[in-house]
Amino acid sequence: MTRKISSGLTRRQVLLLTVLFVADVTLLAAGLTIVREPAPVSAVPSGPSQASCQSIGAQLLAGRGLAGTARLDADGALRFELSGKDVSGNSVPRAGEVAWDALAVAPALPAAGCGPYPFVRVDVPDPAGQAGSRLLVELNWIDLRAWAKHELDDGELATRVKIVPYAQPEAIRP
């Protein structure tokens, strides 16, 4: 028969409560130690910097024979700005059509660790050839990716493209 301790608990119950109390205190101390330690710094390198991604974008354009730059707009969209010339410096006969070539390189950027971007914009000289006139071709990234995966055909993609003509301001001369 088990002997009762003054508060009505048996010796076995007191021993069990003592063990549980020690386990609780140990777990609380371990939890506080874990919470107070700084988060470990990841040894995995982060993706390319914005400047590297812009450089990669320009290289992809050059691979298609297009002269231009790549940059990020304030809203996070990727912008290819094409000069209207090829990499040799010759004028491109159909400057408006090179926008499609530029759009075709954008889906390759995530494989290089860049993007995805909310939108892709291609800024090209106006095909009508008016000085200072340009076209801004904009496409949602999801639609562009679907096109690259052949889930959308050229016609379907063309209906989703937004084209905005604008006049580029002339440089101020002193």
Image: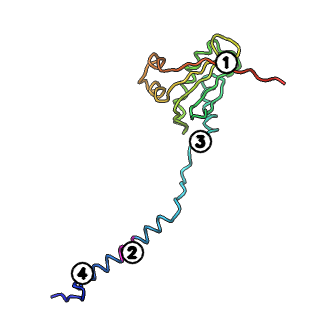
The picture quadrant where one finds residue 51 is: top right
Q: Which residue in the structure is indicated by mark 3?
A: 48
Mark 3 or mark 4, which has the lower sequence index?
A: 4
Residue nearest the viewer, comparing 128 with 66? 128
Task: Find numbered disc 1 in the image and state the secondary structure of the residue it sits on.
Answer: strand
> Which span is picked out in magenta?
22-27
Secondary structure that dominates the magenta span: helix
Instruction: Give percent across and percent down for residue 54.
Output: 62, 34
- Is 138 in front, or is 111? 138
Q: Earlier in the sequence, mark 4 or mark 1?
A: 4
Q: Residue 129 lies in what quarter of the image?
A: top right
User: Marks 1 and 3, Cα distance to the nearest angstrom?
Assistant: 33 Å
Disc 4 residue type? Gln
Does the segment drawn in magenta span residue 25?
A: yes
* Nearest to N terminus: mark 3 or mark 2: 2
Element assignment for label 3: loop
Q: Which residue is mark 1?
A: 167
Residue at mark 3 to residue at mark 2: CA–CA distance: 46 Å
Image coordinates of residue 35 in percent, x first then y, are 47, 64
Which amino acid is tagged 3? Pro
Q: Residues within 10 Å of mark 1 (few under 14, many from 20)?
A: few
Residue drawn 51% across the image and 20% down it: 161
Q: Is 28 drawn above or below residue 132 in the view shown?
A: below
x, y percentage for residue 172? 79, 23
Q: Earlier in the sequence, mark 2 or mark 1?
A: 2
Q: Give the alpha-carbon distance from disc 3 to disc 4, as whole Å.
A: 61 Å
Residue assigned mark 4: 13
Q: Which mark is residue 74?
A: none
Query: Label 2: how many residues lie within 10 Å, few (<14), some (14-19) or many (20+)?
Result: few
In primary-sequence order, the first of circles 2 and 4 is: 4
Horizontal side of 107 relative to 136 (left or right) equals left
